[in-house]
Amino acid sequence: MIAFVQAGVWLRAPTRHSGSRARFCSVTRLGTGLKRTRRFLLAKRTLLQLNGKAEDRGSASEAKSSDKEEAGVKEDATSSESASEQSIRQLLGMRGARRETNKWKIRLQLMKPVTWIPLVWGVVCGAAASGHYHWNEPSDILKLLLCMVLSGPLLTGFTQTINDWFDRDIDAVNEPYRPIPSGAISESEVVAQVWTLLASGLGLAYALDVWQGHAFPRVFAVAALGAFLAYIYSAPPLKLKKNGWFGNYALGASYICLPWWAGQSLFSDTPLDWRTIALTLVYSFAGLGIAVINDFKSIEGDKKLGLDSLPVVYGVEHAKWLSVGMIDLFQMLVAVYLASIGETAYAMTLGALILPQVYLQWKVFLPDPVQNDVKYQGAAQPFLVLGILVTALALGHHAQL
């Protein structure tokens, strides 16, 4: 305390010499204190910066770790979803399927289950057109189910397997992951599958004729015709698929006429009449248009192998108009026929089902037929197959008048 008082007195009342020395010491001490304070502040700031960087690195590390975990979860989910999707595609025989080693899955892939649906539907349409199918009769339901198995898994499976066998060179270009070009199944195994499916299909067709008490084996005759058409469509020397018109019409007829004829022949009291045959043959031209749409994905391979598909012969621009023209025109002709026999309500319903197809053609298919072929078919075909059922119901109703 005395020191502080003395210092205060010294500063307040200095002498001449002692005052200058005191001021010098005082300034020196003040400068030293400022330097120390400055060094302390710099050290503190440096320490804070180092701590901040460490925290940033820690946060960044945590963020990266979190991002990696999230990415891992997403990758796992994506890979799981992708594997699931590919497995479904493989089982259905669709494009984009992964390779399989399980022989039963490979055999199923050769049979292309996704292609069974329209033929199974065609059998239902034929039964409806007969006018003698009883929708609530157990025996009729069982017969119908067996006829579906005949047209779908057995004969369509036969058709798809034999087509893949004769198309193995084309598939090696267009779809090299398919079972035969990839070597996933041997030649002897494919041949055995072809004969097994054919024999089972023809045997079931004959059994249905016997069960129904037909004097002439109508269902067997339709099945044999379908098997013959499948062979000449795929196999040389005729190989109908080499010609865009004949091949696609044969394909359209096999999807519309043959299952319809099988279903109607099974339940009808009489053999098929010429009107039904003519009408379904006309309807098959709409099926030709659908078949042309399937050719857009194979243009490059068809060119290399000399197949005259309509997109190859006429080019993409002309072929796309041909396909939609065939689809729409022949459905409209069928609607006009239904109106002409007095089935006006059915004719109007069929006309209403054509409209969304036309809309989807303009919005989806025509802008890019190569990329949007599958998308269009998935959206538009339900309306086409519903139209076939409407036509069948109209004929069944007319037969009962």
Image: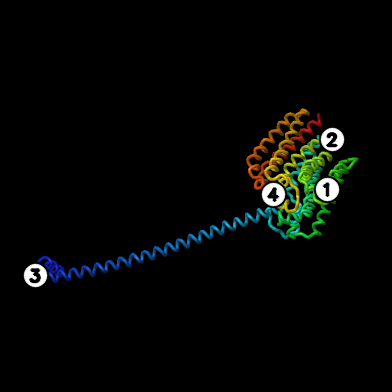
Identify residue for label 1.
227
| Dot 1: element | helix
**Residue 119 shows in this picture:** no
The numbered mark, 3 or 2, whose residue comes first in the sequence reads 3
Question: Which quadrant of the figure contains the N terminus?
Answer: bottom left
Residue sitting at x 27%, y 67% = 37
Question: Which of the labelled discs sits on residue 145, or is there none?
Answer: none
- Indicate which label's residue lies in the foreground, 3 or 2: 2
Place of residue 337 in the rendered image (x, y in percent of width and height, measured from the top left): 77, 31
Q: State the CA–CA distance, disc 4 to disc 1.
A: 26 Å
Disc 2: which residue: 274
The residues bearing labels 4 and 3 have C-alpha atoms spaced at a distance of 110 Å
Residue underneath mark 3 = 16
Q: Earlier in the sequence, mark 1 or mark 3?
A: 3
Q: Position of residue 222 (x, y in %)?
A: 84, 43
Distance in Å between CA atoms under marks 4 and 2: 36 Å
Q: Which mark is residue 297?
A: 4
* Mark whose residue sits in front, 4 or 2: 4
Going from N to C along the chain, the mark reached first, 4 or 2, is 2
The local secondary structure at tag 2 comes to helix
Q: Give percent across and percent down for residue 130.
A: 81, 36
Q: Amino acid at mark 3?
A: Arg
Q: Is residue 297 visible?
A: yes
